[in-house]
Image (cartoon, rainbow, N blue to C red):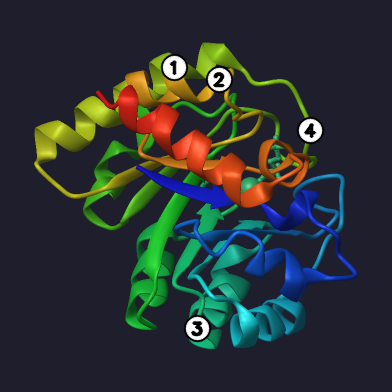
Amino acid sequence: MQISPSILSADFANLQHELEAVRNADWAHVDVMDAHFVPNLTLGLPVVEALLKVSPIPVDCHLMIEDPDRWAPGYAEAGAQSVTFHIEAARDPVRLARAIRGEGARASMALKPKTPFAPYEELLDEVDMVLVMTVEPGFGGQSFMADMMPKVTQVKEAVRRRGGQIWIQVDGGVSADTIEQCAQAGADVFVAGSAVYGADDAAAAVEELRALASAHAC
Ligand code: DX5
Ligand code: ZN
């Protein structure tokens, strides 16, 4: 059970300090948005390169961008340990996943809430993680979509059938109130932005989320 705090809810003027504050987490989740794939703009490769130099934990890049075929391998080349592209935006996901892995990173595909999993099941041979979005991508602090839990279970069952080691990540509205149902449904990597950085003690929030998820592992 792994916790990946999203720095989208952190203080952007003090990102090094904000990464240090969650050094007990498994990953640092970095949301890259291009104002085209989603209606919000955050940061890009130069900032990720700077974060990689100072992060005490591996970096989990979630690319909410158009044309990931062109841009995503660069994040892996820069040293991000996990790179997630949106399947809705990828032109050649097999080639893209292989390019990310070829740079030594874990490759992951993300599904927006309205995107079904079944058409992409064959891609489980090419990725290390599937991200099931539990909000519409674009902003932190939105309400958790419990109706995504059947999709998480569907991915989990497909992973089990194939006998692989593929992780299932959930992102959006994950908190102490919602993480248990995610774990029960089959998720094993939990992104949390406001639930971690909105807490008085970010590190304590990470521990609490991990304990809740671990107690409800399926
Ligand atoms: C939303 C981002 C999330 C966001 C989660 O598009 O992908 O990573 O930061 O924030 P919370 O946990 O506040 O919903
Ligand atoms: Zn994200």
**Label whose residue precedes the other's in the sequence (1 or 4):** 4
- Disc 1 vs disc 3: which is toward the camera? 1
- Tell me the CA gap for discs 1 and 3: 33 Å
Give the mark, 4 or 2, whose residue is nearer the N terminus: 4
Question: What is the x, y in percent for residue 208?
Answer: 51, 35
Note whether 16 is above or below 117 in the view shown: below
Task: Kindly check if marks 4 and 2 are in contact, taking CB atoms under 8 A apart as contact.
Answer: no
Q: Residues within 10 Å of mark 3 (few under 14, many from 20)?
A: some
Mark 1: few, some, or many residues within 10 Å (few <14, many ≥20)? some
Q: Position of residue 29 (x, y in %)?
A: 60, 57
Q: Nearer the viewer, mark 4 or mark 3?
A: 4
- How far apart are labels 3 and 2 at the CA level? 32 Å
User: For the residue labelled by badge 4, is the local secondary structure a helix, a strand or a loop?
Assistant: loop
Cβ of mark 4 under 8 Å from ligand 1: the answer is yes
What label does residue 79 carry, if any?
A: 3
Image-quadrant location for residue 26 = bottom left
Residue where numbered disc 2 is placed: 178
The residue where tag 4 is placed is 141
